[in-house]
Image (cartoon, rainbow, N blue to C red):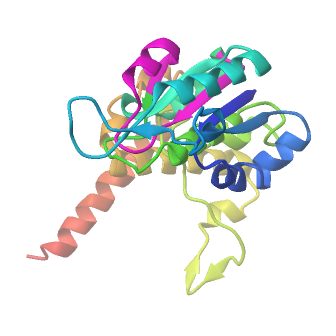
Amino acid sequence: MNIDIMTLFPDSVDAMLNVSILGRAQERGHIAIRTHQIRTYTTNKQMQVDDYPYGGGRGAVMQADPLYRCWMHIVETHGPGHTIFMSPCGRTFTQAVARELKERYDHLILVCGHYEGVDQRFIDECVDEEISMGDFVLTGGEIPAMAVADAVCRMVPGVLPDAECFEEESHWNGLLEYPQYSRPAVWHDRAVPEVLLSGDHGKVADWRKKESYKRTMRRRPDMFAKFDEAQLTTKAEKKVLQQAKDELAAEDAEESKAQHPN
C-alpha cells in the first residue's frame, strides 16, 4: 500500500505516521507513506497557497494551481492513485470504507485542505471522492488523513502480526469489541471474570462473543439493528446470542428495580 499525503504541515503528519507500528511497517517495506509540502509547488516568492474567495466572504481559499502541481508531481513520480479530499462534505468514514479502500486500491493520494476550503476546480479535475470523519469540522485535513492512513494500513498483510489483530476489533463484523483485561487478576477489588482464567478456549470464545453482543446492544442499538442474525447458522451461535439478550434484560430489570425500589 502506497499513501501520499498533500499537506501544509508534513512534519506533524510524519511525526505520527513514521513511528510505532506504522513506522516499523514502512521500514519492512509493507507500506509506504509519503508527505508532500504543498507550498513547495507555488510559483510566488512568498510561497502563498491561498487567496480571497470570489464572491466575498470571510477567510481564504486554497488555490487550485499549487494543489494541482503537487498532485501532478505525485502522479508523475509514484504513479496514478485514488485521490481523496478530506472534507466534511464527503461520505462518512467507517471501518467498511477503510476495508473498501484497502481492498480496491494500492495507491491513495490524500489531500488536506485548510482555511475556508479548496478551489472547487481542483476537486472537479483531480479528486475521485471526498471523505468526512463525521458531522463536525476541523481546522485542517491532517487529522482525518492520518486517521484514514492508519485505519487502512493496519489491515495490510505484515503490518500487524496476523489478521486476528483487527478482525476481532470493534466494527469489523458489525459489532463492538468485548471487554479486555490484563494482570493483575484483582485490581482495586475488581476481579477479572473467572471464565478468562479457566483456560477453556471454547468458553472464553463464547464469553467474548456474548459480551460483544451485549455491549453493542447497550451502547449502539442502531448498529445492532443492522446485525444480520441469519448469519448465525449453528445452535451454539444462536444460544450465545440468546444468552446475551437474556443477561441484558436481567441487568436492565435489576437496574430498574434499584432505581425504583417500590
Using the rendered image of the protein, determine whether residue 235 is visible from the camera's viewpoint: no
Residue 62 in the image: x percent, y percent? Answer: 44, 35
In the image, farthest residue toward the left: 262
Locate the N terminus by quadrant: top right
Residue 105 in the image: x percent, y percent? Answer: 66, 17
Residue 63 in the image: x percent, y percent? Answer: 45, 31
Query: Which residue is found at the position 78% from the left and 20% from the top?
Result: 77
In the image, farthest residue toward the front: 45
- Relative side of 123 to 41, left or right: left
Using the rendered image of the protein, determine whether residue 29 is visible from the camera's viewpoint: yes
Query: Which residue is found at the position 59% from the left and 41% from the top?
Result: 7
- Relative side of 106 to 68, left or right: right
Vertical arrangement, residue 68 with respect to residue 216, above or below: above
Query: Which residue is found at the position 30% from the left and 38% from the top?
Result: 222
In the image, farthest residue toward the right: 28
Quarter of the view holding residue 205? top right
* Nearer to me, 176 or 142: 142
Residue 81 drawn in magenta: no
Query: What range is drawn magenta here?
Result: 105-130
Locate the C terminus by quadrant: bottom left
Residue 115 drawn in magenta: yes
Residue 100 in the image: x percent, y percent? Answer: 57, 21
In the image, farthest residue toward the bottom: 188
